[in-house]
Image (cartoon, grey):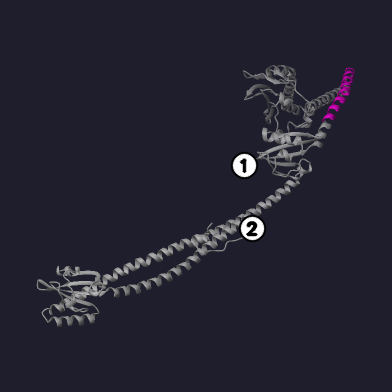
Amino acid sequence: MKTIFRKSFSGYLIVILILVVLAPVLVFNTIKSKFNSTAVSNLTRTAESLEFILAAELEDDPAELDSIVDELGRRLNLRITLIARNGTVLADSEQQPDSMENHRTRPEVICAFNGTVGTSSRHSVTLDRDMLYVAVPVEIGDSIPAVVRTSLFGSDLKSILQRIIADIAIVMLVVLIAGLVIAWFFSRSISDTIRNIADASRRVGEGDYSIRIAPCSITELNRLSSDINGMISRTDELVEELSGKNASLDAILGSIVEGMLVVSSAGTVVTANMSFRRMGLAGEHEEGCGYLDFISNNEFRDFAGNVLNDGILSGEIHSDGSVFSARAAEIPQTDQFVITFRDITEIATTARIKREFAANASHELRTPLTSIKGYAETILENLSGEDRKYMRTILRNTDRLIRIVDDIRILSELEHPATSLDLSDVNLADAVNDTIEFFSGKAFDKGLELIIETETNIPIIQADRFRIEQVLTNLIDNAVRYTSTGSVTVRIGARRNFVTIVVSDTGIGIEEEHLPRLFERFYVIDKARSRSRGGTGLGLAIVKHIVTLHGGWVRVSSTPGSGSMFTVGLPVESTEDTAS
């Protein structure tokens, strides 16, 4: 493979050789043509001058005429020939006229006797040499009695041209040598700069960002070198910045307690943090292999497969008595997934203990509270005055304790992992009508209007009717309890794939700051007011759990002083998978 120096120098060499060959040829041909033209012009002017002199000597003695021609030829360093009309040579500066053949047929002589200047370049038979001839007519009056011919020896012309060729050759040799030297240095400059650029690129590719390309005398290459140096500097800055970010990222990933795994959509493990390895989830294979080989635990391997194949992004993993919360998210524009595993065994155990405690406590408290209530009611019948007032307070708080215990028991049942729904076809309009009857007396006592609004063609849903009635009971009970005047309205409608239940009232309303926490257990806005109205702080938590078990949603909006509106959405399709 040729180097850039060889290619560049070869190109310059070819151009120089072409110029060295063609230029002398063109110059020599031009000089030769010009020289011949000059020689013909000089011979013509000389012949014309001699014509004026020799015209007056034509009548002289031939010997004297030949002597004059000899002297003129010697002085002018030319061959001069005087030719008569019949072609006889009258005089010649180089030969005896008597020994010369008739010249009537010579081309230049023919032209001259025709009244024009004749020229010819040919081999002289008389002298046996190459000659350049110019002949002009000798005009006397209207006649041309003779022709004057001047000529130069071809050898003289050749010697002059040979000297010119030698000079041109010397000049071309100097030009060739100078051109080769300049081409060598220029090609070397280009190749060295390009070699430096290639070397810099190679070293940058190897991670050496300290390299810089030296300036070049060629403007374009110098600009290219400067641009590459700037690019290397910027790349160095970016690499340092990226290295710092990677170091920070490694430190962050190393400090994360949760195990973290990054997997490509093709199933290749990109990276895993130390927590993942400390959990004992990584096998003997290194990063870059498939997740089936990298993950040693079957349950975790199955979850990763569900993320990649089914798009499942969350779940719980139970393995060897431990519980892990698994979450996955797709990394934008990378076609990769990050999966985190958090050991929630302690949290799950604590939650289980709390559920069991709540269930056991509510069960154990229910019996003595019922007994207390029964004895209090019996005693109340035999009391009067202030004692009766105190006993009623005892009964009211006993009822509140019983409701709290019942709500705790219900919550414990709903939160238990084994809880399932008794699904059946449920007509929400019938459920609303049956539930709202329980509150008609209470609403009448407070002067409230209970309104039911049902859209047409409400679909039958698959739901647990008992649990749905618990939802309606809690929502309507709250609406009646916290509404002093006006009405409580229950609307049944349909929205896309959900049947909606909207319970609205014209009560005191709820401040916006309380809305995000409204469905937390035991969260009450005004504890004194809640106790006075018999609230437990668990009703809305029960509502949310039941709706979530059905695969639905619940939302609230409220304006203080104007009332509140709770909206429940229950899916039309079966929720059997969700409930299980």
Residue flagged by tag 2: what amino acid is it? Asp
- Tags 1 and 2 touching, CB below 8 Å: no
- Residue 68 visible in the snapshot: yes
If the image is split into quadrants, where does the N terminus sit? bottom right
Q: Position of residue 132 (x, y in %)?
A: 25, 72
* Structural crowding at the residue carrying mark 1, measured as other residues with C-alpha within 10 Å and reported as few (<14), some (14–19) or many (≥20): few
User: For residue 328, what is the image quadrant?
Assistant: top right
Residue stretch in magenta: 355-382
Look at the image and say whether residue 15 sits in the magenta stretch: no
The residue most toward the front is: 99
Task: Indicate left or right for 371 with 560 as reference.
Answer: right
- Residue 313 visible in the snapshot: no
If the image is split into quadrants, where does the C terminus sit? top right
The chief SS type of the magenta part is helix
| Residue 57 higher or lower than 248, as above or below | below
- At x 68%, y 18%, the residue is 429
Residue flagged by tag 1: what amino acid is it? Gln
Give the distance between the C-alpha atoms of the residues marked 1 and 2, in whole angstroms.
30 Å
Between marks 1 and 2 in the image, the one whose residue lies nearer the viewer: 2
* Residue at image mark 1: 333
Q: Which mark is residue 208?
A: 2
Q: Earlier in the sequence, mark 1 or mark 2?
A: 2
Q: Position of residue 26 (x, y in %)?
A: 35, 66
